[in-house]
Amino acid sequence: MAASLVIEASVSASFADNLKGFILALVSSAFIGSSFIIKKLGLQRAGASGPRASSGGYGYLKEPFWWVGMVTMIVGELANFVAYMFAPAVLVTPLGALSIIVSAVLAHFFLKEKLRKMGIVGCVLCIVGSTLIVLHAPSELSLSSVEEIWELATQPAFLLYTASAIAVVLVLILYCEPRFGQTNILVYIGVCSIIGSLTVMSIKAVGIAIKLTLEGSSQAGSFQTWVFVMVAITCIITQLNYLNKALDTFNTTVVSPIYYALFTSLTIFASAIMFKDWSGQSASSIVSVLCGFITVLSGTLVLHSTRDRDPTSVADIYASLSPQGSWFVHENGEIWKQNADDGLCPDFDAIIKQDHFN
């Protein structure tokens, strides 16, 4: 009888924690979805008067809109951070799809990116999928110290994942970005998503440490806590930098769903390795959560495919790649520089020399 009461109390506490995490995730999605649009407006205004973020410019730091968007995103991320204290990543992370709905609706009104009828179907699919995930989300793993989290982070399987993630990110930054960053969205989004999965793991570790401290078991004296803090800060800065580049280079309708799909998939995978979210779960619960995630992913793809893309972004990309030629023209003993757009005189001997290629 006593054992039964303990189990019921544990289940009730787990449900309450998941509910808190769910509500915080909803609030987070609303703020983060809004921040995409506000920051995009700031980036557009900065790009109109100076170098764009994708070209290495930092003029957006002078734009009030970008800072409002940044503050909005920080509020959303703080709500998301607290959500990870109470609920597993398998529950919190997929609910980020709701931010796509928010950004889609706001983009329709403020960025003139049309949301069509099938886009509404995509929004409904996101909501249905999120509901499935919430109903079948696993319980949070019970941890009593940051040392236990450290043991989970240093297990061979997760160390292998971390090493692989860092290796791929270095390849994307050092090799792919200079060559394909302006034309292939997977370069910027790949860096954001991979680093983002490590961000979530470190933030969750810090969140659990704070939660334990507030419950009376201080974790501030453990060096592992500060290691997780430093990793989280480093990952967040890198993630935001490449998210800015992605938003400035490509349309919001492209960035949001692809970022969500890759980021969520990698985060669920990383969390399953580190925190063993599926341990003790029934096959039906696992399948239900996966079906919910696939439904949400389908909704994001439908939403993405039915919204207008920004035609100017592609034009801007290829405009910066167009060749500009000039020639040194020798005629009647005189030499002058002939531009590519100028008409050529009929009587000359020309030595064509390409001046530069942007």
Image (tube, rainbow, N blue to C red):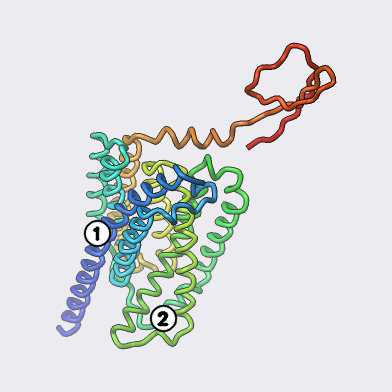
Circle 1 packing at 10 Å, graded few (<14), some (14-19), many (20+), is many
- Asked if residue 99 shows in the view, the reply is yes
Task: Return the mark for residue 285.
Answer: none
Q: Which quadrant does the N terminus fall into?
A: bottom left
Could you say which quadrant of the image residue 87 lies in?
bottom left
Vertically, is 125 above or below 217?
A: above
User: Which residue occupies 34% across, 40% down?
Assistant: 304
Three-letter amino acid code at the position of disc 1: Leu
Question: Taking the image as drawn, is residue 90 in sight?
Answer: no
Helix, strand or loop at label 2? It is helix
In depth, the one of 160 and 5 nearer the eye is: 160
Q: In the visual, does 6 lie left or right of 331?
A: left
Spatial separation of the CA atoms under disc 2 and disc 1:
27 Å
Residue at 31% in and 49% down: 100
Q: Position of residue 333 (x, y in %)?
A: 85, 20
Q: Which amino acid lies under the numbered mark 2 shown in the image of this protein? A: Val
Q: Quadrant of the C terminus?
A: top right
Q: Residue at x 75, y 29 (%)?
A: 353
Task: Locate residue 274, reporting x and y percent.
Answer: 43, 68
Q: Which residue is mark 2?
A: 146
Given residues 356 and 221, the one toward you in this image is 356
How many residues crowd mark 2 within 10 Å: few (<14), some (14–19), many (20+)? Answer: many
Give percent across and percent down for residue 66: 38, 54
Residue ID at (55%, 61%): 166
Q: What kind of element bears circle 1?
A: helix
Q: Where, by quadrant of the figure, is residue 133 drawn?
A: bottom left
Residue corresponding to mark 1: 26
In the picture as drawn, the residue positioned furthest to the right comes out as 333
Position in image of residue 3 (x %, y %): 20, 82
Q: Nearer the viewer, mark 2 or mark 1?
A: 1
- Residue 86: which quarter of the image? bottom left
Q: Earlier in the sequence, mark 2 or mark 1?
A: 1
